[in-house]
Image (cartoon, rainbow, N blue to C red):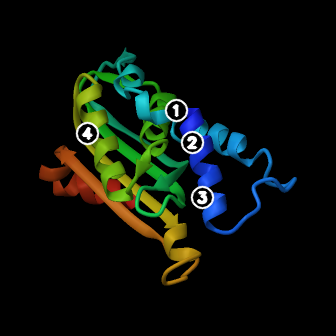
Amino acid sequence: MDREKIKQATLMFLEAIGEDTDRPGLKDTPERVANMCEELFQGMDTDPSTHLCKTFEMAEPGLVIEKEINFYSVCEHHLLPFFGNVSIAYTYTDKVTGLSKLARTVEVYARRPQIQERMTREIGEAIMSGIDGCTGVMVRIEAEHMCMSMRGIKKPGTKTVTLYASGRFETDMKLREETLALL
């Protein structure tokens, strides 16, 4: 990440909207924005498979559900936040990953300029390919987008729900329905 470019861009932006970049309240803003960008976009250079490769042996196949993993992301269209929660279900044959690894995978994708639809698919695909023995994945995201709440249509509280399903969740409709009811 190029901190100097971020600081220069912040100064140019503030000047473009008519602000006095020398006034006390804005003096350190370019540095604060650079710090913020490092934090908000730390998933840019992170490979989610580093989290999912740690697995534990299981005696029999099963289902894991982790619900309502809170996240914050930035919409790539308007550079405004969107936030909400992710629920993940996956079926396995003989191995599971640590529960925190699912939340870490969510963070990798949320910490990038993003759209919810792609983020849903990316999380699902990462889990499906990253957990050895995974036979199906379902990812449900519910989020509020500030680009709809504070600008444009101005409808605060509106939620967007996206769903990704693969493997057994595409072929076993009973499993899909039961899991959706739990999510």
Residue at horizontal 27 percent and vertical 60 percent from the top: 177
Binning the other alpha carbons within 10 Å of mark 4 as few (below 14), some (14 to 19) or many (20 upward) gives: some
Residue 107 relative to residue 117: left or right: right
> Where is the C terminus found, in terms of image quarters?
bottom left
Residue at horizontal 55 percent and vertical 77 percent from the top: 151
Rendered view: 64 above or below 161: above
Q: Which residue is mark 3?
A: 13
Q: Earlier in the sequence, mark 2 or mark 4?
A: 2
Q: Give the numbered dot on residue 6.
A: 2
Alpha-carbon span between mark 1 and mark 2: 6 Å
Binning the other alpha carbons within 10 Å of mark 3 as few (below 14), some (14 to 19) or many (20 upward) gives: few
- Where does the image place residue 16, in percent across and percent down from the top left? 60, 64
- Where does the image place residue 136, in percent across and percent down from the top left? 23, 40
Using the image as rendered, state which of residue 60 and residue 172 is in the foreground.
172
Determine the image quadrant of residue 3.
Answer: top right
- Where does the image place residue 168, in percent across and percent down from the top left? 17, 44
SS label for mark 2: helix
- Residue 126 at least partly seen: yes
Q: Inspect the image, locate mark 2, and give the three-letter code of the amino acid beneath it.
A: Ile
Q: Residue furthest right?
A: 24
Alpha-carbon span between mark 4 and mark 3: 37 Å
Q: Which residue is mark 1?
A: 2
Alpha-carbon span between mark 1 and mark 4: 30 Å
Q: Which residue is mark 4?
A: 125
Determine the image quadrant of residue 61.
Answer: top left
Q: Are marks 3 and 2 in contact (CB under 8 Å)?
A: no
Q: Earlier in the sequence, mark 1 or mark 4?
A: 1
